[in-house]
């Protein structure tokens, strides 16, 4: 046991003291937050840009809707006539909205055009369209002598709360939340396996190419060395993830503290909406937040937590021991290609299946891949937030354990023989022979 | 004499390939034991089995009278032929790690490392990374790590490869010193002249079989050919040569003469003794040189392998 601890410590320190590890650990959060900030910043810059639009309203009924906002200024060129307005717009403004003369409300919507140098964005067009539609609707309502206020009072916002037969509430937000949490967990495991599995493999190859391996295994059992490597690398990985989580949290806190309210208000500019709408949005966001909180409470958190740990360990141990065996079988990293493909395949399939699984978490595909041990750590984790029958979880866990033992046994055999083999480019046939040594 | 290591009837197969076929050797305590053989003969396989890196298919190994067990690792020091160190790890750290893997406590390992580092005058390497050292320098560190835990049995596989002559000598002296201090040493090599200098006992392995073993002196006795190298001064060389030829088997010596004498390799024919040969030669000419040709380990090696082949 003492030796295993020594190996774990060395592997951990070797990984953690590595310059690229330190740089990656410290810079990634800055990069991630920086990138996010950049996107937000650019978005804001984009929307801050004031666009000047001209309009010619020959109908004389719609001019009042073109009120200046923070991002758009309107200029009334009706008096100049369409042709002059066009040439003037070309010179001074971004675009020209043209509303032709119409005798009846019915035809008011016809023949409206937008002239501009380049193709306007869809959002700009639909913004203008909805402005006009709304105004025409209101005009029509007035023409029919309905009370606009009363009609507004009839408008309601419906959110369907669905509930399963055992009384657990579910909702659209809940489903989204489940998709997010499940997908996030699955993706986290996927990333961890690939990054740190490869790191285990590199470490094995390093021992082989530096020829220290024979010195080491004259002191410890190869299996101890392999296990120490796997655990040491995993600890380094967990440390890295914790540092990332903490530093991203810290940076975000600092940023919101410095930019204070600005960041909080950076959503779709509230100023653009009329007070009524603001009220509505606030109402709905409050109830949304409550819903989200309620949904979080409804998630099978304990099951998720323990199954995450279980599948995380199981998946990582299975794949990293395969990676260790691959590292032992080859002489250099360039030779690993032929073995990497079959290892990556189930992982990639799991991620793809996973994303279809969160659409239909209880279908046969979901069931199959969440039982199959090479994909279950990812797929089952994605399913669990949606509620999975116990027998399925237990079957999948048992299969994972059995596979884990079998694969570690095979991997250890290949590892034991492989680390002392030089100069041979191993084929699968060769590896099969090694199992019998 | 007590044996530190006894290997009894060890067999090892890799698939259809036989690496060791019923090999037995005994390494006497306090000796330097030469394990010789051509490439691929099975030396490294045997050494790996002794180090418990691989298990034998059959056969038993005793260390100091006990069947080999995992804890015996601490009593063996092994310098493999394929050797190296972690390139990006510091020398001191690495030596401490390897010593601790051999079961030493950290403080003990530190103390002994400082002793050896001072002895080899390499104390200022402690904080250097291996990749900053030359190959020979790294080998010195490896040698220290191998002997640090003062094992009863030391196994060196081609220890001198990678050393310049000065450092090779240093290592050779250290090996002999360790023997004098009571360690037993197994020494595997192709370099026969170092065997000659170092080994008391040898075993020769060829094609998975042990074909020869014993005390080096005894083996040399066994392989002596009753051949003598003789130098003769005479005015009538051709007549003399004829006369000797009629009585003994004569070959021309490869050694060139520096004073124009006749250099011959003469073998005894029947039951004559060397005294009779000297008397015969003394009557015919002036003897300037007379030695028995003792087979070198190299000759024995080649001969034994050829006979076995």
Image (spheres, coloured by chain):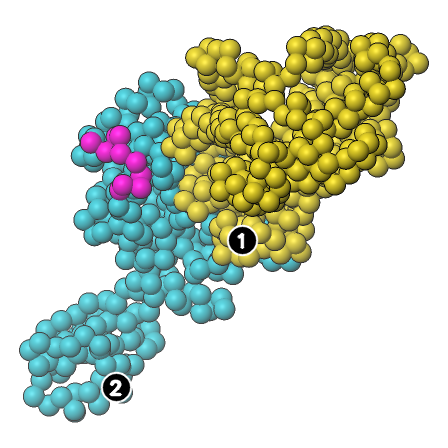
Q: Which mark is residue B245?
A: 2
Residue A7 horizontal side relative to residue B297, left or right: right
Quadrant location of residue A165? top right
Could you classify mark 1 by the number of other residues whose Cα lies within 10 Å: few (under 14), some (14-19), or many (20 or more)? some
The residue located at (81%, 29%) in the rendering is: A105
SS at badge 1? helix
SS at badge 2? helix
x and y, in percent, of residue A318 in the image: 66, 34
Structural distance between the alpha carbons of marks 2 and 1 = 66 Å
Q: Which mark is residue A335?
A: 1
x and y, in percent, of residue B177 in the image: 25, 37
Residue B304 versus residue A378 in the image, above or below:
below
Residue B35 lies in the magenta stretch = no
- Marks 2 and 1: which is nearer the front? 1
Of all chains in the rendering, the one displayed in cyan is: B
Could you classify mark 2 by the number of other residues whose Cα lies within 10 Å: few (under 14), some (14-19), or many (20 or more)? few
Which one is in front, A242 or A264? Answer: A264
Which one is in front, A17 or B251? Answer: A17
Quadrant location of residue A71? top right
x and y, in percent, of residue B44 in the image: 47, 50
In the rendered image of the structure, the colour used to display chain A is yellow
Counting labels gives 2
Residue B95 versus residue B225 in the image, above or below:
above
Part of the protein shown in magenta: B124-133
């Amino acid at each position: 046991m003492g030796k295993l601890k020594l190996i774990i410590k060395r592997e951990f320190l070797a990984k953690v003291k590595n310059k690229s590890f330190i740089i990656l650990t410290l810079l990634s959060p800055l990069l991630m937050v920086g990138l996010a900030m950049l996107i937000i910043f650019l978005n804001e810059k984009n929307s801050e840009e004031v666009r000047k639009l001209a309009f010619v309203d020959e109908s004389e009924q719609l001019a009042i809707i073109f009120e200046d906002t923070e991002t758009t200024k309107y200029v009334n060129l009706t008096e100049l006539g369409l042709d002059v307005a066009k040439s003037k717009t070309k010179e001074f403004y971004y675009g020209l909205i043209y509303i032709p003369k119409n005798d009846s409300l019915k035809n008011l919507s016809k023949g409206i055009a937008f002239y501009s140098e380049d193709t306007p964005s869809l959002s700009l067009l639909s913004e203008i369209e909805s402005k006009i539609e709304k105004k025409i609707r209101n005009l029509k309502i007035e023409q029919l002598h309905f009370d606009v206020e009363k009609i507004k009072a009839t408008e309601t916002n419906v959110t369907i709360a669905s509930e399963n037969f055992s009384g657990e509430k579910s909702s659209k937000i809940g489903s989204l939340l489940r998709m997010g949490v499940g997908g996030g967990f699955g993706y986290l495991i996927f990333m961890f396996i690939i990054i740190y599995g490869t790191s285990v493999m590199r470490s094995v190859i390093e021992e082989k190419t530096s020829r220290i391996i024979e010195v080491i295994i004259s002191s410890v059992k190869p299996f101890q060395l392999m296990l120490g490597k796997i655990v040491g690398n995993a600890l380094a990985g967990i440390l890295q993830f914790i540092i990332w989580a903490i530093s991203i949290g810290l940076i975000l806190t600092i940023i919101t503290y410095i930019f204070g309210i600005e960041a909080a208000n950076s959503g779709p500019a509230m100023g653009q909406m009329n007070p009524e709408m603001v009220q509505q949005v606030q109402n709905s966001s409050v109830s949304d937040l409550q819903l989200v909180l309620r949904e979080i409470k409804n998630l099978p958190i304990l099951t998720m937590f323990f199954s995450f740990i279980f599948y995380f360990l199981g998946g990582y141990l299975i794949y990293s021991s395969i990676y260790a065996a691959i590292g032992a079988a080859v002489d250099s990293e360039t030779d690993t290609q032929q073995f990497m493909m079959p290892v990556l395949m189930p992982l990639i399939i799991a991620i793809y299946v996973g994303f279809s699984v969160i659409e239909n978490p209880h279908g046969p595909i979901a069931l199959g891949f969440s039982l199959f041990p090479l994909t279950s750590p990812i797929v089952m984790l994605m399913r669990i937030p949606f509620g999975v029958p116990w027998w399925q979880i237990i079957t999948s866990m048992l299969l994972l354990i059995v596979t884990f033992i079998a694969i570690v046994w095979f991997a250890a055999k290949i590892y034991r023989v492989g680390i002392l083999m030089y100069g041979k480019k191993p084929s699968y046939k060769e590896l099969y022979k090694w199992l019998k040594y | 004499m007590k044996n530190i290591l006894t290997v009894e009837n060890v067999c090892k197969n890799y698939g259809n390939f036989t690496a060791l076929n019923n090999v037995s050797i005994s390494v006497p305590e306090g000796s330097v034991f030469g394990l010789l053989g051509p490439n691929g003969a099975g030396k490294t396989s045997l050494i790996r089995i002794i180090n418990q890196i691989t298990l034998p298919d059959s056969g038993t190994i005793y260390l100091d009278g006990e069947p080999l067990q995992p804890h015996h690792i601490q009593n063996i020091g092994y310098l493999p032929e394929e050797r190296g160190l972690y390139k990006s790890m510091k020398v001191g750290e690495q030596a401490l790690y390897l010593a601790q893997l051999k079961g030493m406590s950290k403080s003990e390992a530190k103390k002994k490392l400082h002793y050896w580092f001072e002895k080899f005058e390499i104390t200022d390497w402690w904080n250097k990374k291996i990749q900053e050292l030359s190959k020979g320098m790294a080998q010195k560190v490896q040698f220290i790590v191998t002997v640090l835990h003062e094992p009863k049995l030391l196994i060196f596989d081609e220890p001198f490869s990678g050393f310049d002559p000065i450092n090779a000598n240093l290592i050779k002296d250290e090996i002999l010193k360790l023997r004098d201090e009571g360690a037993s040493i197994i020494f595997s090599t192709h370099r026969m002249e170092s065997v000659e200098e170092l080994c008391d006992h040898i075993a020769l392995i060829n094609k998975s079989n042990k074909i020869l073993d014993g005390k080096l002196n005894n083996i040399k006795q066994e392989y002596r050919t009753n051949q003598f190298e003789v130098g003769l001064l005479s005015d009538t060389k051709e007549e003399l040569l004829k006369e000797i030829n009629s009585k003994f088997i004569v070959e021309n010596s490869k050694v060139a003469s520096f004073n124009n004498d006749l250099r011959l390799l003469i073998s005894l024919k029947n039951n004559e003794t060397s005294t009779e040969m000297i008397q015969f030669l003394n009557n015919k000419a002036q003897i300037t040189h007379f030695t028995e040709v003792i087979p070198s380990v190299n000759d024995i090696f080649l001969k034994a392998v050829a006979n076995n082949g």
